[in-house]
Image (cartoon, rainbow, N blue to C red):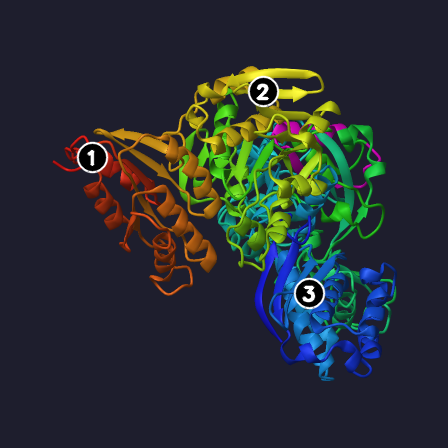
């Protein structure tokens, strides 16, 4: 078997409303060997993966897939189910999958859900290999497969602290996106409502507070001045100074680097000069400045304060082992590390114990070696600090915190100025006020780890991710989302997106817009190019100033990666017509319609789907629409629209040459069509439809009729406001119409407008990408010839064709039309435009269906065209 394509669909897509992995799989000769022709396959697979019994498949009951397997199914279908189950076995609960045959024999489109993208892709690769071995009765090492997948999982998974916050956000319906794979940098929400974290540091964490927490001496001075008990001590830079400080304080002492975390470089309970020298060397490796301070006897506690409130407390104990009277100390450590709860780093509940120089020194201080047999019940401590990252354990004591201790913890958070703070407190107990016992705050931590509170070794786990999300999004109903309007269809997407963005801006909204041509933020172009896919959506939704996002959604983006968002407030479906058929296994208009309806299927509960009631396939596609429906139509007598309006539905239409909104018995006038510049006094019917669609979407987003009217009358078909879309320019006695009509439906719509513009001759420069079908290119050529007197054909992008092939088909189509249309092929766009400029004269209409709009406009500026040739009254040249 051979994987032809393999990628993640990161949002709602053609196959699923949820993220999924897409695999285009060539099963090769296995096309001739369905599972019922493979003896023993059911028994072998169920022995290997007994949990496949739970897969319902299309039968809809447990064991459904195994029944299909026994009855006979193809290898691609088996790959789907194995990929799902491998993910389940490494801890990701997934269930959805779909396998469909393509238009090519032996090639299948396999789709299955994922939770982690890297693991989902890896599971697909492993499942193909496993299924091929299964069908060929070869050896399968499942433990080895699962170990490889776990390694992928562990390399990409979020740490427990960040994961807890993400899970809390998910429960609130707050979207999140991982902005960096390396450092747990996460964005919650969109646009101006977003919040960001890096692990447990938030965008609101104060820089000064972070600096205080990172500097242990500064922390001691600040807290000591405020009356908080802290150990006596000083900072030094040389051992002689450390020795003087220790003797002044009196042994035992603790030594730590001024800057550090996770207990690195910290030594405690130092009782003599030699131990001090060793500890000083260890600390100075971490930082040249070292703290020598009083050693406080007591239990190590961590107090977690979030948003000024104590939310959790844990008693921590350093990594240790308990003797059994038989096993050596090394053997006890090895046995402890075999505990399945222990893993590398933060992957498990506990961390494996790694013996280092500090461990060996501590063991020596207890008059032991690694070969010593530890008496039964004796505890041997292996680390000087109780950090979980060095193998320590934790017990939840949140319910035992005395009110006075709680007050001290919350006061420390205010004094340091941190929104999330971990306070390390040495105390005999948390059930008594600090002044009644031996106690001191030894350290505070910005960005503290949550693992000890989420999954303590003993006691109840605390959901400490939730208070972080509640702090970042204090309104319990807030989801951090901004309104998203997504526009799709075969033609008119870019104009509708630009017009809708203009309506919103005129109403005072800060808009992020992405379309074919640009990404614009607050009316500033930040990127140029084709931005009608999910990457553009992500860029807009990351922008911190955006209050509303308006996104063009093209077929290619849906099929390649899915939508760039999980749901939208308004989904607009303009039309469905023949274009790009044959790509991504979309061969029919019905398949194209299903692709386009992904946008209206992604409308959130309470949102709105805006549908073109004049397009039969759009009308049929309303079965996929979520939320309310607003129709738009050029036919005020449309039967489905009248029925919709009678049932209190909303529709935008044209009545008596006015754009109106209807609902029930109410008809509200918006604006006369003649006052909408992009309609060319109503001659550009396609732009009347686009204006209706944008008006409906704007109304769904909360704009008033007055807002819509003001926006419609101030949006002009100029290169500045709508570049490359029906830009009509007067140029020295002739007219130039610039448009992006590169497919048959677009050109058919444009022909009505071209025919309404008075002209001596109509001259066109046109092309089409090579990824259109032969018949589409030929038909496009016939339309060009019918519309114009002169046609210059160029070739913009062969897209897999032999260079010149697309231009040849266009020319053949144009020359098939009887008449006097002159046709030339000039392969380069710039040369074709220059040739047309040289040909055109006074009174002509030059129609440029081109890509380089800015270049053409530059050529128009300051250019003088030929005057019209003088003629006799009969039209003959003089």
Q: Which mark is first along the chain, 2 or 1?
A: 2
Q: CA distance from mark 3 to mark 2?
A: 59 Å
Which residue position is annotated with label 3? 150
**Residue 111: where, in percent of width, then height?**
67, 60
Is residue 442 shown to the viewer in this render? Answer: no
The circle on residue 875 is 1
Q: Between tags 1 and 3, which lies in front?
A: 1
Residue visible at 52% across and 51% down in the picture: 239
Task: Please determine whether, in this image, residue 515 is positioned above or below residue 804.
Answer: above
Q: Is residue 699 magenta?
A: no
Mark 1: give few (<14), some (14-19) or many (20+) Cα within 10 Å: few
Residue in front for this viewpoint, 691 or 14: 691
Answer yes or no: is residue 335 visible.
yes
Q: Give the mark nearer the N terminus: 3 vs 2.
A: 3
Residue 202 horizontal/vertical position (percent) = 60, 37
Q: Are marks 3 and 2 in contact (CB under 8 Å)?
A: no
Query: Which quadrant is home to the C terminus?
Result: top left
For label 2, the residue is 660
**In this image, 575 relative to 833: left or right?**
right
- Badge 2 marks a residue whose secondary structure is strand
Residue 133 point in image, percent of width and height: 70, 80
Q: Nearer the viewer, mark 3 or mark 2?
A: 2
Residue at left 78%, top 45%? 315
| Quarter of the N terminus within the rendering | bottom right
Q: Is residue 414 magenta?
A: yes
The residues colored magenta run 407-432
Element type where label 1 sits in the image: loop
Disc with the residue nearer the chain's start (1 vs 3):
3
């Amino acid at each position: 078997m051979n994987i032809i394509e393999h990628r993640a669909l990161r949002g709602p897509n053609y196959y699923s409303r949820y993220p999924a992995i897409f695999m285009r799989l060539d099963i090769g000769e296995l096309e001739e060997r369905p599972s019922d022709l493979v003896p023993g396959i059911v028994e072998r697979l169920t022995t290997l993966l007994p949990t496949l019994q739970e897969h319902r498949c299309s039968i809809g009951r447990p064991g459904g897939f195994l029944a299909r397997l026994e009855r006979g199914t193809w290898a691609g279908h088996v790959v789907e189910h194995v990929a799902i189950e491998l993910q389940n076995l490494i801890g990701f609960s997934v269930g959805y999958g779909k396998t469909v045959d393509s238009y090519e024999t032996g090639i299948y489109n396999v789709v299955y859900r994922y939770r982690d993208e890297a693991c989902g892709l890896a599971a697909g690769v492993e499942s193909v290999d496993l299924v091929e071995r299964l069908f060929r009765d070869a050896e399968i090492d499942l433990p080895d497969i699962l170990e490889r997948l776990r390694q992928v999982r562990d390399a990409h998974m979020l740490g427990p602290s960040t994961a807890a916050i993400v899970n809390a956000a998910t429960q609130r319906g707050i979207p999140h996106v991982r902005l960096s794979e390396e450092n747990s940098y996460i964005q919650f929400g969109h646009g101006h409502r977003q919040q960001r974290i890096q692990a447990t540091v938030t965008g609101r964490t104060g820089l000064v507070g972070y600096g205080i927490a990172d500097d242990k001496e500064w922390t001691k001075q600040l807290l000591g001045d405020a009356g908080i008990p802290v150990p006596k001590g000083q900072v030094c830079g040389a051992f002689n100074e450390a020795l003087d400080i220790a003797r002044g304080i009196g042994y035992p002492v603790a030594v730590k680097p001024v800057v550090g975390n996770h207990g690195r470089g910290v030594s405690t309970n130092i009782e003599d000069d030699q131990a001090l020298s060793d500890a000083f060397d260890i600390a100075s490796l971490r930082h040249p400045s070292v703290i020598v301070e009083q050693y406080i006897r007591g239990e190590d506690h961590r107090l977690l304060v979030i948003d000024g409130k104590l939310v959790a407390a844990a008693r921590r104990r350093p990594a240790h082992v308990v003797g059994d009277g038989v096993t050596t100390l090394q053997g006890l450590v090895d046995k402890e590390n075999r505990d399945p709860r222990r893993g590398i780093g933060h992957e498990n509940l506990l961390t494996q114990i790694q013996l280092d120089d500090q461990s060996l020194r501590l063991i020596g201080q207890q008059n032991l070696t690694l070969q010593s047999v530890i008496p039964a019940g004796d505890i041997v401590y292996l680390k000087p600090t109780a950090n979980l990252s060095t193998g320590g354990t934790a017990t939840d004591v949140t319910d035992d915190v005395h009110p006075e201790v709680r007050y001290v913890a919350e006061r420390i958070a205010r004094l340091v100025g941190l929104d999330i703070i971990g306070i390390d407190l040495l105390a005999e107990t948390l059930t008594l006020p600090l002044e009644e016992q031996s106690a001191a705050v030894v350290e505070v931590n910005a960005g503290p780890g949550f693992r000890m509170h989420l999954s303590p070794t003993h006691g109840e786990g605390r959901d400490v991710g939730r208070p972080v999300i509640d702090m970042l999004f204090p309104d319990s109903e807030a989801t951090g989302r901004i309104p998203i309007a997504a526009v799709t269809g075969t033609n008119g997407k870019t104009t509708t997106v630009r017009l809708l963005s203009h309506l919103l801006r005129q109403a005072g909204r800060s808009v992020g817009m992405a379309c074919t041509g640009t990404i614009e933020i607050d009316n500033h172009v930040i990127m140029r190019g084709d931005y009608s896919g999910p990457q553009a959506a992500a860029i807009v939704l990351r922008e911190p100033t955006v209050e509303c996002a308006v996104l063009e959604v093209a077929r290619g983006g849906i099929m390649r990666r899915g939508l760039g968002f999980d749901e939208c407030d308004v989904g607009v479906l303009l039309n469905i017509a023949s274009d790009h058929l044959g790509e991504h296994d979309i061969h029919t208009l019905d398949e194209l319609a299903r692709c386009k309806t992904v946008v209206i299927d992604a409308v959130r509960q309470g949102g709105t789907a805006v549908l073109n009631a004049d397009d039969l396939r759009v009308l049929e596609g309303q079965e996929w629409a979520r939320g309310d429906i607003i129709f738009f139509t050029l036919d005020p007598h449309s039967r489905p629209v009248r029925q919709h309006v009678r049932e209190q539905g909303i529709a935008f239409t044209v009545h008596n040459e006015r754009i109106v909104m209807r609902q029930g018995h109410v008809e509200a006038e918006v604006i006369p069509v003649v006052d909408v510049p992009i309609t060319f006094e109503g001659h550009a019917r396609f732009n009347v439809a686009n204006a209706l669609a944008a008006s409906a979407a704007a109304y769904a987003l909360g704009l008033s009729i007055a807002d819509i009217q003001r926006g419609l009358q101030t949006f002009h078909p100029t290169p500045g406001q709508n570049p490359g879309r029906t830009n009509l320019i007067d140029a020295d006695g002739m007219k130039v119409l610039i448009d992006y009509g590169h497919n048959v439906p677009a050109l058919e719509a444009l022909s009505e407008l071209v025919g309404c513009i008075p002209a001596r001759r109509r001259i066109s420069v046109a092309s089409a990408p090579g990824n259109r079908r032969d018949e589409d290119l030929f038909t496009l050529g016939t339309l060009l010839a019918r519309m114009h007197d002169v046609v210059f054909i160029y070739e913009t992008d062969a897209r897999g064709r032999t260079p010149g092939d697309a231009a040849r088909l266009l020319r053949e189509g144009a020359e098939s039309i009887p008449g006097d249309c002159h046709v030339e092929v000039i392969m380069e766009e710039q040369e074709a435009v220059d040739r047309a400029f040289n040909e055109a004269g006074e009174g002509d209409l030059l129609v440029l269906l081109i890509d380089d709009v800015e270049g053409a406009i530059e050529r128009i500026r300051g250019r003088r065209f030929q005057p019209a040739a003088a003629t006799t009254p009969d039209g003959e040249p003089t």
